[in-house]
Amino acid sequence: MSDTDDTTPITLYRLQACPFCERVVRKLSAYDLPYTSRFVEPMHSDRNAVKRISGARTVPAIVDENTGVTMSESGNIVEYLDKTYGGAD
């Protein structure tokens, strides 16, 4: 479900083979959430697109147009997805 389809409300900014990014990908897949992957530059200093959306150059970062949430850090994103889409308390 992770193509470059601009019609999906969730966008994931990520790196190739990043274990933290893959953690978020697994959670998105577990909830069967469609999303768009945006692969970013490997060089931290070149990640201006990520900085524009989240205020930092770290990945993963997610933009969820369903709720208006933008965040980074895999732990925070996984917790957010659980609370928002998983029915967790």
Image: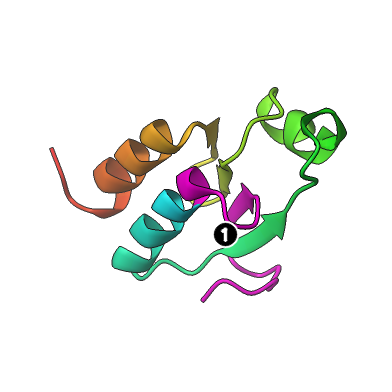
- Residue 27 placement (x, y as % from top left): 35, 56
- Which amino acid is tagged 1? Pro
- Residue 45 figure quarter: top right
For the image shown, how many numbered marks are present on the structure?
1
- Is 57 left or right of 14, judged from the image as shown? right
Residue displayed at 54% across by 32% down: 72
Residue displayed at 47% across by 48% down: 19
Residue 31 visible within the image: no
Residue 7 visible within the image: yes
Residue at the outermost top position: 55
Q: Is residue 13 above or below residue 51?
A: below
* Dot 1 alpha-carbon crowd within 10 angstroms: few under 14, some 14 to 19, many 20 or more: some
Q: Which residues are magenta?
A: 1-21
Q: Nearer the viewer, residue 50 or 5?
A: 50
Residue 57 included in the magenta stretch of the image: no
- Is 61 left or right of 66, judged from the image as shown? right
Residue 10 included in the magenta stretch of the image: yes
- Residue 79 placement (x, y as % from top left): 31, 37
Provide the major secondary structure of the magenta segment.
loop
Q: Quadrant of the C terminus?
A: top left
- Residue 50 placement (x, y as % from top left): 73, 37
Q: Is residue 33 above or below residue 24?
A: below
Residue placed under numbered mark 1 in the picture: 9
- Is 32 left or right of 55, judged from the image as shown? left
Q: Nearer the viewer, residue 44 or 9?
A: 44
- Identify the secondary structure beneath mark 1: loop
Residue displayed at 64% across by 31% down: 58
- Residue 16 placement (x, y as % from top left): 64, 57
- Is 62 left or right of 56, judged from the image as shown? left
